[in-house]
Amino acid sequence: MTVAVRVSATVTGHRRAGVREHGLELELPSGPVSARQLIEASVTAEVAAYQARVEEASLVRVLTGKSLREDLALGAVRLGGPRDEDPGKATPAEVSGVEVTRAVQTALLAFGDGLFKVFVGDDELTEDADVEVADGAALLFLRLVPLAGG
């Protein structure tokens, strides 16, 4: 079953970064899900979204006068591709080779090691508890940063 959620990610102690929120569609089994299933689905969806952005960036786009002015206002206009700037630099398609299985394993290991917490709404998700995730649910991935000297 596909569930549309709002995902936020933040890092403790970084006020400047703030909380970034975006929509994401997760493939989850119906009924309550475990932390492992939720993390696997989230990482898989994020990798797919990343690869789609990389693919889109590698397409040749025609800039209209209006879009050029909008991009100039944002300060992000690039002419040509990465190879035009530096012949030795990899193209976005070459960099996009993120392995989903490895990314999921890394995320699960980090969760197991306590490097980040997962919240569904106001409830913290633990390794041994299942939670129901409904359409529109808010997920928060909170990365923990150790205190210096302590």
Image: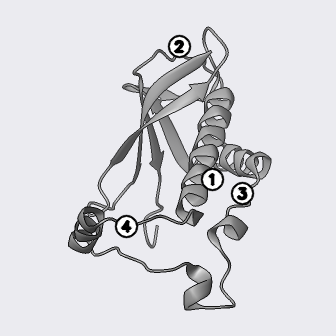
Residue at 51% from the left image edge and 80% from the top image edge: 80
Q: Secondary structure at mark 3?
A: loop
37 in relation to 117, above or below: above
**Disc 3 from disc 4: Cα separation:** 29 Å
128 in relation to 73, above or below: above
Q: Residues within 10 Å of mark 4 (few under 14, many from 20)?
A: few
Q: Which numbered mark, 2 or 1, is in the foreground of this view?
A: 1
Residue 108 at x, y = what percent? Answer: 69, 43
**Sequence order check, earlier mark of 4 and 1:** 1
**Sequence order check, earlier mark of 2 and 3:** 3
Q: Secondary structure at mark 2?
A: loop
**Sequence order check, earlier mark of 1 and 3:** 1
Name the amino acid, label 2. Glu
Q: Which numbered mark, 2 or 4, is in the foreground of this view?
A: 4
Name the amino acid, label 3. Val
**Sequence order check, earlier mark of 3 and 4:** 4
Instruction: Return the mark for residue 98.
Output: 3
Q: Are marks 2 and 1 in contact (CB under 8 Å)?
A: no
Q: Which residue is mark 1?
A: 51
**Disc 2 from disc 4: Cα separation:** 45 Å
Residue at 48% from the left image edge and 62% from the top image edge: 146
Q: Residues within 10 Å of mark 1 (few under 14, many from 20)?
A: some
Residue 25 at x, y = what percent? Answer: 53, 29
**Sequence order check, earlier mark of 2 and 4:** 4
**Disc 2 from disc 1: Cα separation:** 28 Å
Residue 66 at x, y = what percent? Answer: 24, 63
- In depth, the one of 35 and 9 nearer the eye is 9
Q: Secondary structure at mark 1?
A: helix
Q: Which residue is mark 2?
A: 132
**Disc 1 from disc 3: Cα separation:** 8 Å
Q: Which residue is mark 4?
A: 63
In the figure, residue 85 lies in which quadrant?
bottom right
